[in-house]
Image (cartoon, rainbow, N blue to C red):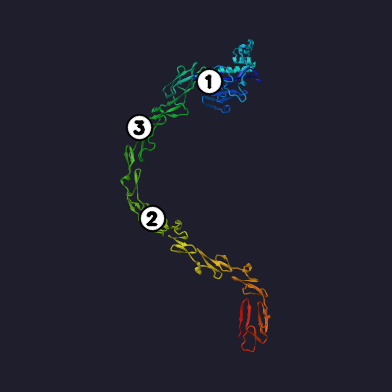
C-alpha cells in the first residue's frame, strides 16, 4: 500500500498479490500482482485486476465497469471528475512509491459478490530474498540466466520457480525494459534556423541553422539543389547560387549518436528568374509549382515587355487598337518607354476625328442630319423614314408614299380584297368589320373568335364579313331571343293524325299522344291495339278487332245483349201464339214471319192477298242491332 499526504492532497494506491503458476499451471512459491486499486482525496477511484484465467483484465472507473468498452473500443477514453481512463495498445503502466499491506478495513477494492478481502489475502506466504539461497543455488541461477550478464529478474524467478523458460522470459523482459528506459531517457535533438529564402539566379543566398542535444549531434542534409549548393556541418551555414530555374528543395535536420532525428526544417524557396533583365521580381506574388516548398517570384515587366520572364516584346497592335481605316504600327520597347505608348496610328479617314492620337467616330446624328431617323455607323451615318414615307434622292429627307404604296420606305403595295375600301400609307389595307388579313380578304369567323356573340340557346352561323344568330328547331326568333313554337296550333307544323292521336306541344318540339285503342310506336306515330289478341276486351264469347276498337259476337244459339258484350241463349219467339199471322221462323236472337203462296207480308207480321196493284214488301232483318229496310214499289 502507498499513501501520500501533501497539504490537502491525498492519494492512496493498493495492490493485491496472488501465487504465481508455472507453465503447466501449478502454483509455485512466488507471487504476482493480480490487482491494483487507487483513490484520491476527491473520492475518484480506479481498480484493475486480472481475471481468474489471468488472460485479461477487469477495469472499474469510479465504481463503473469499463471492461467491455476497454477491449472493444479502440478509441476508448473516459473522462470524469479527477479521473481519466484511456487505452494505449491494451497496456496499463503504473508507478509505485512505497510498498505496504492492505487489510479489510483499508481496502479500496470492489469484490465480486460472495467474496471479500480474506479470499485474496495470503497471510502464510513468506517472501524471500536472493541472498537467502545457498551460494551454489545462486551460481546455478546465474549460469542458467547467462553468467555475468544475467539480470536480477531472471535469477530471482529461477530461484523461486526452478523454471528456466520462465526465468529467461523474465530476464528478456527486464533487458527490454532497460533498453526502453535508455531510449526514453534520450532527448531528441532540436534544430532551428531559416525557414525560407528569396533566391535570385546567379546571386548567392545564405541560410543559417543551429542545433542542440544532450549527447551531441551532427547536421544531416535530407535534400538540396543539384548544383551551386554548399553546407558547413560545423557552423550550419548554407550558401546557394542558383544557376537555372530547376525546381528543387532544401531540407536540413540534426541527428544524435542514437540516430534520433530532429524534426527537419523544409525551407520555403521563392526563386527569381531575373526577368530577362526586362522587369523586377515581386516576391509577394508567387507562381506555384509541383513542389509545395518551391515557387517562382512573379515578374513585373517593364513597358513593352511581357511573358513569365519578361522576354517577349509586347505587340501593342494586337486587338486592333486603331479605328477601322487607320493603320497601326507597333513601337519597340525603348520607344514605348520614351513615348509612353505602345503603337502609332495613321491619319483618320473620312467620318473620323483625331483625339489624343486616336481616331474617334463623328456622330453625324447629333447634327440633325436626317428628317426622321438617323443611325450612326463607324465613319458614316444612315437616314431612314417613318412608315408611310420613303427616303428622297438626297438620302436625308423623307416624302409621303404614293397610293397604292405603303409601309416602311413605301416598299409594300396595297392589294385590298372585298373587306376593305381604304389603303392607309402606314398600315396598308384597313379592314372593315368582319374582315381580316393583310389584304382584308379573310373573313373573320365571329362564331369562333367570340363564342358569346350569340345567346347560349342560339346557333351562330358565320357569314362573309358578318354572322347570324338563329334558333334551333322548335323555336322562333322574337326580338333577338328564341321563343318556343306551338306546333299543335298549326296542322302544317306537325304530323299527328287526328284519327288516331292528339298533338301535344313540348318545349322545342311536339309529340303525338295516341287515342284510346291505339298505342305509341314513336313520338309521332300510333298503331291500332288488337284488343282481341292481347286479351284487353270485355266480350263474353267472340271478339272481332276493328280499327281503334273491337266488336263482340256470340256463338250459334246465343245473342248479344244491349251492352253489346254479353251473350245469352236464343229465345224461340215463334212459340208465342199469334206472333205471326200465318207462318213464324225462329232466328238467332230474333224471328221472321212468312206468308203462304199468293200472300204478301206487310207490317212484319200480317199477310195480304196479292190482287192489289201496288205491292209493298217489307222485310225486316235484325242483325247485331243493325236494321236493314228494303222497300219495293
Gap in Å between the C-alphas at discs 1 and 2? 112 Å
Q: Residues within 10 Å of mark 3 (few under 14, many from 20)?
A: some
Toward which corner of the image does residue 305 lie, by quadrant? top left
SS for callout 2: strand
Q: Earlier in the sequence, mark 1 or mark 2?
A: 1
Q: Residues within 10 Å of mark 2 (few under 14, many from 20)?
A: many
SS for callout 3: helix
Q: Nearer the viewer, mark 3 or mark 1?
A: 1
Foreground residue among 421 and 159 = 159
Residue under numbered circle 2: 428
Residue under numbered circle 3: 336
Q: Earlier in the sequence, mark 3 or mark 1?
A: 1
**Residue 305, labelled with which disc?**
none
**Residue 11, labelled with which disc?**
1
Foreground residue among 597 and 496 = 597
Foreground residue among 409 and 76 = 76
Toward which corner of the image does residue 477 lie, by quadrant? bottom left
Q: Earlier in the sequence, mark 3 or mark 2?
A: 3
Tell me residue 467's x, y (percent).
44, 60
Is 318 situated left or right of 96 in this image? Answer: left
Work out which residue is located at the far top of the displayed protein and give it.
135
Q: Residues within 10 Å of mark 1 (few under 14, many from 20)?
A: some
SS for callout 1: strand
362 above or below 336?
below
Foreground residue among 299 and 8 = 8
Amino acid at each position: 500500500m502507498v499513501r501520500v499526504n501533501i497539504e490537502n492532497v491525498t492519494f492512496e494506491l493498493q495492490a493485491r498479490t496472488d501465487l504465481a503458476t508455472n507453465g503447466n499451471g501449478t502454483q509455485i512459491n512466488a507471487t504476482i500482482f493480480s490487482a491494483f486499486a487507487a483513490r484520491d482525496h476527491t473520492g475518484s477511484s480506479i481498480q484493475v485486476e486480472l481475471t481468474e484465467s489471468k488472460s485479461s483484465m477487469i477495469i472499474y472507473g469510479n465504481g463503473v465497469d469499463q471492461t467491455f468498452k476497454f477491449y472493444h473500443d479502440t478509441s476508448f477514453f473516459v473522462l470524469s471528475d479527477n479521473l481519466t481512463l484511456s487505452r494505449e495498445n491494451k497496456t496499463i503502466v503504473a508507478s509505485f512509491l512505497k510498498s505496504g499491506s492492505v487489510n479489510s478495513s483499508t481496502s479500496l477494492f470492489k469484490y465480486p459478490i460472495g467474496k471479500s478481502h480474506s479470499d485474496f489475502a495470503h497471510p502464510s506466504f513468506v517472501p524471500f530474498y536472493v541472498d537467502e539461497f545457498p551460494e551454489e543455488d545462486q551460481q546455478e541461477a546465474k549460469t542458467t540466466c547467462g553468467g555475468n550478464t544475467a539480470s536480477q529478474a531472471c535469477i530471482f524467478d529461477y530461484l523461486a520457480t526452478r523454471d528456466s523458460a520462465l526465468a529467461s522470459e523474465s530476464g528478456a523482459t527486464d533487458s527490454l525494459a532497460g533498453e526502453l528506459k535508455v531510449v526514453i531517457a534520450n532527448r531528441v535533438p532540436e534544430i532551428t534556423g531559416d525557414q525560407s529564402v528569396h533566391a535570385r539566379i546567379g546571386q548567392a543566398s545564405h541560410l543559417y541553422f543551429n542545433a542542440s542535444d544532450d549527447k551531441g549531434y551532427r547536421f544531416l542534409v535530407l535534400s538540396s539543389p543539384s548544383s551551386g549548393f554548399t553546407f558547413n556541418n560545423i557552423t550550419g551555414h548554407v550558401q546557394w547560387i542558383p544557376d537555372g530555374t530547376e525546381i528543387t528543395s532544401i531540407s536540413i535536420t540534426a541527428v544524435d549518436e542514437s540516430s534520433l532525428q530532429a524534426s527537419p526544417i523544409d525551407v520555403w524557396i521563392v526563386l527569381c528568374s531575373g526577368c530577362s533583365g526586362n522587369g523586377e521580381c515581386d516576391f509577394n506574388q508567387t507562381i506555384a509549382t509541383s513542389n509545395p516548398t518551391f515557387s517562382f517570384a512573379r515578374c513585373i515587366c517593364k513597358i513593352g515587355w511581357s511573358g513569365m520572364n519578361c522576354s517577349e516584346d509586347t505587340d501593342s497592335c494586337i486587338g486592333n487598337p486603331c479605328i477601322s481605316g487607320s493603320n497601326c504600327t507597333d513601337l519597340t520597347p525603348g520607344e514605348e518607354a520614351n513615348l509612353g505608348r505602345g503603337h502609332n496610328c495613321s491619319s483618320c479617314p473620312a467620318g473620323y476625328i483625331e483625339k489624343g492620337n486616336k481616331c474617334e467616330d463623328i456622330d453625324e446624328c447629333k447634327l440633325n442630319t436626317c428628317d426622321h431617323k438617323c443611325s450612326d455607323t463607324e465613319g458614316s451615318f444612315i437616314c431612314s423614314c417613318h412608315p408611310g414615307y420613303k427616303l428622297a434622292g438626297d438620302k436625308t429627307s423623307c416624302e409621303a408614299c404614293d397610293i397604292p404604296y405603303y409601309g416602311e420606305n413605301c416598299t409594300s403595295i396595297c392589294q385590298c380584297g372585298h373587306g376593305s375600301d381604304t389603303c392607309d400609307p402606314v398600315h396598308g389595307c384597313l379592314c372593315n368589320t368582319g374582315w381580316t388579313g393583310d389584304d382584308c380578304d379573310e373573313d373573320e369567323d365571329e362564331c369562333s373568335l367570340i363564342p358569346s356573340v350569340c345567346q347560349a340557346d342560339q346557333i351562330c352561323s358565320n357569314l362573309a364579313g358578318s354572322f347570324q344568330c338563329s334558333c334551333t328547331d322548335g323555336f322562333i326568333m322574337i326580338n333577338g331571343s328564341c321563343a318556343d313554337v306551338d306546333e299543335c296550333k298549326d296542322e302544317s307544323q306537325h304530323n299527328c293524325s287526328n284519327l288516331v292521336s292528339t298533338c301535344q306541344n313540348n318545349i322545342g318540339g311536339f309529340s303525338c299522344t295516341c287515342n284510346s285503342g291505339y298505342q305509341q310506336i314513336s313520338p309521332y306515330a300510333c298503331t291500332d291495339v288488337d284488343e282481341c289478341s292481347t286479351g284487353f276486351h270485355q266480350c263474353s264469347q267472340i271478339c272481332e278487332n276493328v280499327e281503334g276498337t273491337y266488336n263482340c259476337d256470340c256463338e250459334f244459339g246465343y245473342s248479344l245483349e244491349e251492352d253489346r258484350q254479353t251473350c245469352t241463349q236464343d229465345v224461340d219467339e215463334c212459340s208465342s201464339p199469334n206472333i205471326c199471322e200465318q207462318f213464324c221462323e225462329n232466328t238467332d236472337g230474333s224471328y221472321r214471319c212468312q206468308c203462304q203462296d199468293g200472300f204478301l207480308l206487310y207490317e212484319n207480321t200480317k199477310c195480304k192477298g196479292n190482287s192489289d196493284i201496288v205491292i209493298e214488301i217489307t222485310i225486316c232483318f235484325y242483325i247485331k242491332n243493325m236494321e236493314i229496310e228494303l222497300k219495293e214499289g
